[in-house]
Amino acid sequence: MNDKRTAAAGGDAGSPRHVSAARDADAASAAVVFGDAWRYAPAPEARDHVKIAPRYDLFIGGAWRAPASGRYLDSISPSTEEKLCEFAEASEQDVDLAVQAARTAYEKRWSRLRPLDRGKYIYRIARAIQEKARELAIVESLDGGKPIKESRDVDLPLAAAHFFYHAGWADKLEHAFPGRRPRPLGVAGQVIPWNFPLLMAAWKLAPALAAGNTCVLKPAETTPLTALLLAKIIEEADLPPGVVNVVTGAGATGAAVVGHPGVDKIAFTGSTEVGKRIQRALAGTGKRLTLELGGKAANIVFEDAPLDQAVEGIIRGIFFNQGHVCCAGSRLLVEESVHDALLHKLRERMATLRVGDPLDKNTDVGAINSRAQLEKIQDLVASGEREGAARFTPRCALPERGYWFAPTLFTGVAQSHRIAREEIFGPVLSVLTFRTPEEAIEKANNTMYGLSAGVWTAKGSKSFWVAQRLRAGVVWANTFNKFDPSAPFGGYKESGFGREGGRQGLLAYLEVD
Ligand code: NAI
Ligand code: MG
């Protein structure tokens, strides 16, 4: 494990980790053998070209405005607990101004623009994201705690790709829905979470703008920075004032966006709890709604699967990004005959994961996004131990400051355990077994969620057979957590409704008859 910037036993509840790891003889030996073999010299990303202002105001009507209340919140770096900046807390009054600005921009400018010209603006945003990709990736890792490998190689390229993809649709909407008459909805209110701050902003803004809507975007309170830098990009791209407005703040600001009568459509990504509250608040208002909520994805490994490849997919699916992924493969379903072989490989691989400084290019697992999230993970892991599952956490020294949780695996998990049912949203994997494909499907579908799933098998026909029976919006075969803007993404059941990406994603921002 990564042993730079270490303390004896920081982060994750200290000693219980070591006690439970030591219980597992296999675990301890794997950690010793592999931990030492994978020591890397620190390779920190340079921060010198990154400019974070001490304070950010609200981006409303193309201008930066102080919040009516005069109140500001702090954004900190979860890897060091250092304060990065202050950002405005928008009240109902500020949200009202933003919605008015968006309405005026919709009626006077954006809906009157030739679709081709809308496309040019969106294309310009995409290019600017590419040009500033390095700075944006660093800020994303600083503000949110995710490893630079992820922000640089996944979040940034995908965010740009979403704008490029939707720039192309702007003047082709009639071809997306031939014989029908696609029209924009008006003003879209968009509330996004902290796990993919810039990418979720791109997922929301790009299709809305391409379809001809204007937007009021509310980033999460622990990760406002890249959305604010995106607002600067949008300003520099010279979009008509008010087409995109960014209002920062916490839950109350989100609720003000959701509840504003001048908003025609709400797009929300976040917790199932808040999603349900929003659905109740919007009932009967006529506002359109899409919800992308939690998940408890099953990664199903059959005995004929390429096990080494599966191990990489499992690791990517739950440990990279600290498990802060709604479609994370948080339940591993293994065919009994390969359970021991797969678990042996998995433990060995886990012992090589490097946890630490998100700005280090060697880091696999970064910081937990907030103290509240760390406490939620600790609580669920403690419940797993109490309910009788066997815990494995490789020996791992964690940095002294900041919020950290070492990659953790539970075997002997029953379907009734909380760790098998609830979204942990942390680097914690629950392993269950099955004997027949039918049993695998039944267990995979035995959840209130239905966002994603994975199937690992050498037989193409088997993966299709399984995929057809899984109640999940996305099913990956022999891979995991792969995205493309042309592929629609969204859930079943309590994972929400509506799709983002692809032709289907455009529908969420259009009236089509
Ligand atoms: P959250 O759902 O409270 O936050 C998501 C966004 O909604 C933030 O921008 C927040 O300010 C806003 N918000 C909060 N209350 C609101 C309200 N009443 N009306 C409108 N907007 C509101 O999620 P939180 O508390 O940060 O995380 C809790 C759990 O939710 C996590 O542990 C995880 O299990 C899950 N989660 C799922 C995500 C996903 O991508 N599906 C993303 C983030 C969290
Ligand atoms: Mg932060």
Image (tube, rainbow, N blue to C red):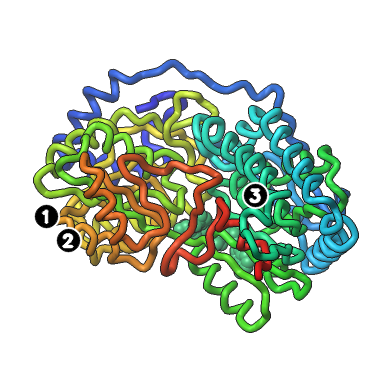
Which residue is at a point 34% across and 63% down the rendered structure image?
471
Instruction: Give the labeled residue for mark 2.
Output: 439
Residue furthest top as drawn:
41
Q: Amino acid at mark 1?
A: Arg
Q: Are marks 1 and 2 in contact (CB under 8 Å)?
A: yes
Instruction: Give the labeled residue for mark 3.
Output: 201
Which residue is at a point 17% across and 53% down the rendered structure image?
433
Residue furthest left as drawn:
337
Q: Is residue 335 left or right of residue 178?
A: left
Q: Are marks 2 and 3 in contact (CB under 8 Å)?
A: no
Instruction: Give the labeled residue for mark 1.
Output: 435
Q: Amino acid at mark 3?
A: Ala
Q: Horizontal and vertical percent for residue 153?
A: 52, 31
Label 1's element? loop
Above or below, 479 relative to 433: above
Label 2's element? helix
Q: Where, by quadrant of the figure, is residue 109 drawn?
A: bottom right
Asked if residue 369 can be seen in this view, the reply is yes
Q: Horizontal and vertical percent for residue 178?
A: 63, 59
Above or below, 405 relative to 435: above
N-terminal label among 1 and 3? 3
